[in-house]
Image (cartoon, rainbow, N blue to C red):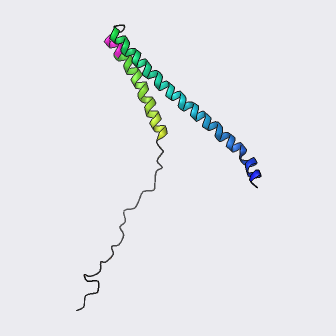
Amino acid sequence: MFLVDDILLSPVKGVLWVFREIHEAAQQELAGESEAITGALSELYMKLEIGQITETEFDAQEKVLLDRLDRLQAAEKAAAAPEKKPGKPRSKARRPRRKTPAPGGSAAVL
């Protein structure tokens, strides 16, 4: 019985394996791009300090690189966060209150 199950499910397992590999490759590419942007920012700071670029050029290039880095980090957070499914709205009906017993544990006698 297990052999038949394995044979029938092997195409599905193969497709899942391919999707996992694609996902891992995409994650590695995103990590590499983030490192490349960080390296470019370091080079930009160095160029500013040695006087190769002006302050306005630095500001413009830094803004572009930081925007790209922010978008990458936002995409990584969105991919890491589980999606919340919209739930049914809860009704605001109240439960009936329970009556509390009289002090002393027994009913009051008149």
Q: Quadrant of residue 67?
A: top left
Q: Is residue 57 magenta?
A: yes
Q: Is residue 92 above or below residue 61?
A: below
Of all residues shown, which one is farthest toward the top? 52
Q: Position of residue 39 (x, y in %)?
A: 44, 19
| Highlighted range, magenta | 54-58
In the image, 92: left or right of 87?
left
Residue at the limit of the structure toward the left, as seen here = 110
Quick check: 103 left or right of 68?
A: left
In the figure, is residue 2 to the left or right of 34?
right
Q: Which residue does the image show at 64% across and 41% down from the upper left? A: 16
Residue 42 belongs to magenta span: no
Where does the C terminus fall, quadrant-wise? Answer: bottom left
Give percent across and percent down for residue 34.
Answer: 46, 26
Above or below 57: residue 76: below
Q: Position of residue 76 (x, y in %)?
A: 47, 34
Which quarter of the figure has residue 66?
top left
- What residue appears at the point 61 percent right and 35 percent down from the top-left corner? 21
Q: Quadrant of residue 17?
A: top right
